[in-house]
Structures are given as structure tokens and as C-alpha cells.
Image (cartoon, rainbow, N blue to C red):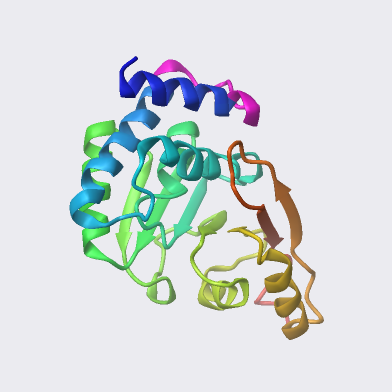
Amino acid sequence: MERGDILEQELRAGLKALGQQDLNDQQVQQLVAYIGLLARWNRAYNLTAVREPRAMVERHLLDSLGVRPYLCGQRILDVGTGAGLPGIPLAIAEPGRHFILLDSLGKRMVFLQQVLLELKLENVTLVQARVEAYQPVEPVDCILSRAFANFADFMKAIDHLLLPGTTVLAMKGPAAETELAAWQAQHPNQSAPQLISLTIPGAGEQRSLLCWRQSWDRSSP
């Protein structure tokens, strides 16, 4: 069996375990092609510590898609996207939504430009900037991150982007409860984020999601 066939087989099994069999053949092929590009460019650009394509299916594709049921709205901002995670897999799975992939490193933008070109993704905008300086042309509905920073620092960095109704999704590992407790101690009067346990096929560690929604209006006295 060819490597691509093995990756597709493992991806389809993982999608079934996630309950995401709604992805069509073209989307599955795009996800496999993305892993192929990531593995090839990784040798020169050092985009991820994961080197083996089969491990990338579990640790990158399925992990990214695990947050898909919790996305809100049409404009999704992926902060510190790195090699396009979770933004690229989610953009493939959700063609009706628009994804803004934000990162400060130029070499990552070069890789992501090639990904958009080869995969023909039209629902993705790339922005090279620090999140603290980012001023979107249009407000975003949902802000997510994957291994970007601890939750308190993440919330501080995106504070200027929060509007009433904005949903924040922070993908976390075993440190989620500790980060949540630290944030709550600093913000005792704010509503607490919801801690959601994610079941990711093949994940070697606990995966969690901190979900928080902006509910107050800055313009109110």
C-alpha cells in the first residue's frame, strides 16, 4: 500500500472516531495533501517537531479537527497558526467559513502561501503580524489558538479584538485546569471559561478546550 493510501486510511478511521464522516473525498484528499506538503517543507523550514507523516495525521489533523464542533460564526481567527494548525484543516473541513491565519514569522507565511496555492483554498486569508498589533478590517466571530500561550497571556493579547458575542477557543493539553485556575484568580468577577474534554483518536495526552464568550459591551458605562 502506498504511503498516501495509508495516510488516507488512517485519516478516514480517525474522522469516523470523531464523528466527522461528512467530509467528502476531495476534502480528505486535501487533508492528505496538506500533510504531504508539511512533511516535505518541514525538512528545510522546521515547521513542526513531528516528523513522521502518520504521526502528523493524529497529532495535527485529528487534533485540529477536534475543535470543529465548537466553532462559532463565519469569521474565524487562528492566532499563532504556525504551520497552519488548526486553521488549514478546519478551513478544508468548513469551506463555508472564512479563516484568518495569523503568525509573525515570514517563513511560515511562505509555506502557507504554497499550501493555499496547491490546495486551492479560497476561504483563507494570511496575515503576518503579532496579534497585539493586529487590527482586522472586519470583526471576527471566533478566536482560537493551539499551543500559542498560556490562557491568561492569550486573553491579554487578544483583548482588543473582543466584542460582545466573540467566542474564544483555546486548545490545551494537561495544563488546562491549572491555566484556568490561574486566570480565574486574576479575574474573579468575570464569567469562567468552560473546560471541555476532547477525545482525539490516537492522542497520547489529555486534550482539552477552554471555551469563553465575551458577554459585556465595552461601550456601556
Is residue 216 in view from this perspective?
Answer: no
Q: Where residue 92 sits in the image (x, y, percent)? A: 43, 34
Q: Quadrant of the N terminus?
A: top left
Would residue 59 be found to the left or right of residue 217 on screen?
Answer: left
Give the residue drawn at x 35%, y 54%: 48
Drawn side of residue 136 relative to residue 188, left or right: left
Point 57% across, 72% down: residue? 150
Say above or below: 98 vs 209: above
Instruction: Report whether 3 appears left or right of 194.
Output: left
What residue do we see at 68% from left, 41% from top? 199
- Specify the segment rendered in magenta: 16-26
Q: Inspect the magenta stretch and tell me whether residue 22 lies in it.
A: yes
Q: Nearer the viewer, residue 5 or 93?
A: 5
Q: Locate residue 166, reporting x and y percent.
A: 62, 59
Residue 77 lies, with reference to residue 32, above or below; the image says: below
Q: Position of residue 72 (x, y in %)?
A: 62, 46
